[in-house]
Image (spheres, grey):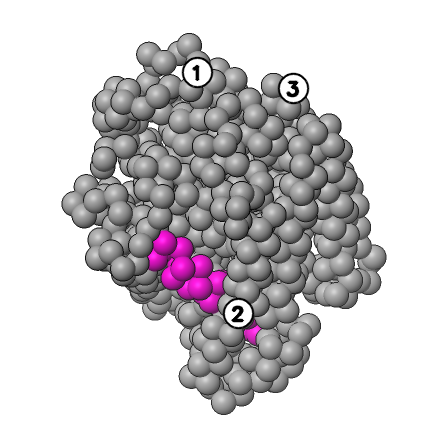
Amino acid sequence: MDILYLALGAGLIGLVFAVVSARQLMTEDEGDETMRSIGVSIQEGAAAFLKREYTFLAGFVVVVTAVLVVFIDYDALDKLPDKGGELTDLPRTGISYLLGAVASATAGYIGMYVAVRANVRTAAKARIGLNPALRVAFSSGAVMGVTVTGLSLLFISLLYLIFQNVSPLTGFAFGASSIALFARVGGGIFTKAADVGADLVGKVEAGIPEDDPRNPATIADNVGDNVGDVAGMGADLFESYTGSIVATVSLGAIAVVGAGENGVFESDAITQYSSDAFILPFGVMAVGIIASIIGTFLVRANENANMGQLLWALRTGIFGASAIALVGTAILVLALDVDFVLFFVVLVGLIAGQVIGTVTEYYTAYEFSPTKKLAGQAETGAGTLVIGGLGLGMLSTAVPLLTIVAAIWITFELAGLYGIALAAVGMLAPLGITLATDAYGPVADNAGGIAEQAGLPEEVRDRTDALDSLGNTTAATGKGFAIGSAVLTSLALMVTYSQVVGINSFDLLEVEVLLGVLLGGMMPFVFGAMTMGAVGRAATAMVNEVRRQFREHPGIMDGTESPDHTRAVSIATDGALREMILPGAIAVIVPVLVGAVLGPESLGGLLAGSIAAGAVLALMMANAGGAWDNAKKYIESGHHGGKGSESHKAAVVGDTVGDPFKDTSGPALNILLKLMSIVAVVFGPLFL
């Protein structure tokens, strides 16, 4: 129990650090009146979108909570042996689901609230120098990172201390996952619809710069960066972090740490929830939060730093936090007097995460040959650029997946199925700082937009562009981390599901399992098609609106008329909210239907098929999209003809294709995998 209180304390420390950092950030200079006015427009647009999105999601949460209370809390779980806790008459899963949904939405909202206020302050600091701007943008990301990790660990620890039972924790993870999927899909549709409209009509057709104030979609584009890449991403990684803890503690309650004969791991060797195997993930995450906070102070950059030096500035913080987390984990393992092999499991998870991140960086950053070669293909047109990007994305899946395979094999040999889940915990332990390096990117992007619209000097835009380019790379790296941890966590949840329904193995020679595998392999592609189509439809509406304004108000181009930014924001909002419903619903409905109609064996096959297909597709989409984006930025920096050239126009088309790949469909797939797995765990008893 001492470790649980350590986890509670670390969660509280993280939230206190977030509050102090946010308050300090708010004291920074906001720039001149023009900059502040632009900042307020972005703030209002983001707040309006989240208000409407959360209003819709509130109704969804109420319905699902009622279903859980009626069909789970008062029916199926009563048939299972209770492992302790005096509050057994309460609808524990329903309450936990509600708390998970609220906590996930809160994490996303706080991140967005800070980001839309940090953007104008980053632009103001960029007038002074690169390092001050980096510090402000990174601080806003740090607020997001420690808020996500602190809230998750605090709530999970409290729920177990109150209920003394693992089952409610799955409800909390279900709530976090369901909100994350809608937030990621809805925010992703909004941001990419606005981005595509701004790029295709503004850059390509009208020939005006990115973030030009004459472009009606500019403010919507800036708003989208925050509701998609900050609020959506915050909810996304909240559920990743939560899911890894819940999967590991669930296996810690039922699985043995250590091998039997021929590497066979008995399923009933650990039955007490107070066991060290159960409690260890709380301690590892607690150490990770403290390490992440320390790591934020290590991020510094020289004034004349190039892209490589900026990357190393962020790496210093990440590597420093990871090293501290490892030292803390070693002390924790020794203090608990468990087999020291568990330290090496956590180490493998951390190393696997770093390898995936580094490989992602290699394939997406324009300092390296893959993206440089991709930019060169723009000289022969958009077609060859798109073909090259697809090939790059496919090839880029090999090393990350081999890394995941190696991590699974090694950790299973070290500590069985429990080891696989604990590796995911190790990978996400320093999430507070890895998320900070990801979340700062949209802030830097917004800062560049504000600098352009406010007419700030060219050197200011150069500094924000440098930070924005770095943000594209760190965002791709963050997505790689999320996908890698999603595979490990989903596998652990699949094992938990098998224990819930009493199936020891899923035999591919059984037709029920084979049917499920094929349906599972189909799901990521259907889901990806639905989200890509949603972006296409929403973007079409945005393109038509921007064209209409340019056509009906020709004075926009010469400055005698003002574009209607509010109308563009409204169109993006309507499209996102309308289009997010069906993709989000099928992630919950399909596992329940398969389990109810085809049986629990088919549902197990569904999970296995979705993990295999989803991991490959998510990596391909994220990396191809990141490479197309940075290929465009490489050309804009003066290569292959620079801005306004035919190569640049081709690169804009490639970036347009890649935007929904990397910011909508790709990131949402890792949530899909975990959400379907947690739905199976929660509803599994109904299919017996």
Is 301 in front, or is 648? 301
Q: Nearer the viewer, mark 3 or mark 1?
A: 1
- Give x and y (percent) for residue 581: 28, 46
Residue type (three-letter) at the residue carrying disc 2: Ala
Among the 4 quarters of the image, the one containing residue 259 = top right
Name the residue beneath numbered marker 1.
84
Name the residue beneath numbered marker 2.
398
Name the residue beneath numbered marker 3.
2
Residue type (three-letter) at the residue carrying disc 3: Asp
Crowding near pointer 1: few (<14 within 10 Å), some, many (20+)? few
Mark 3 and mark 1 in contact? Answer it, CB < 8 Å: no
Question: At 52% across and 17% down in the image, what residue appears?
Answer: 161
Question: At 44% across and 26% down in the image, what residue appears?
Answer: 166
User: Residue 205: which disc?
Assistant: none
**Nearest to N terminus: mark 3 or mark 1:** 3
Please state if 541 lies on the left or on the right of 113 as rendered.
left
State the extent of the magenta-drawn residues as a range. 608-633
Is 155 in front, or is 102? 155
Residue type (three-letter) at the residue carrying disc 1: Gly
Among the 4 quarters of the image, the one containing residue 5 = top right
Give the CA distance from mark 3 to mark 2. 42 Å
Give the CA distance from mark 3 to mark 1. 18 Å
Q: Nearer the viewer, mark 1 or mark 2?
A: 1
Please state if 486 lies on the left or on the right of 315 as rendered.
left
User: Considering only vertical position in the picture, is 247 above or below 427?
Assistant: above
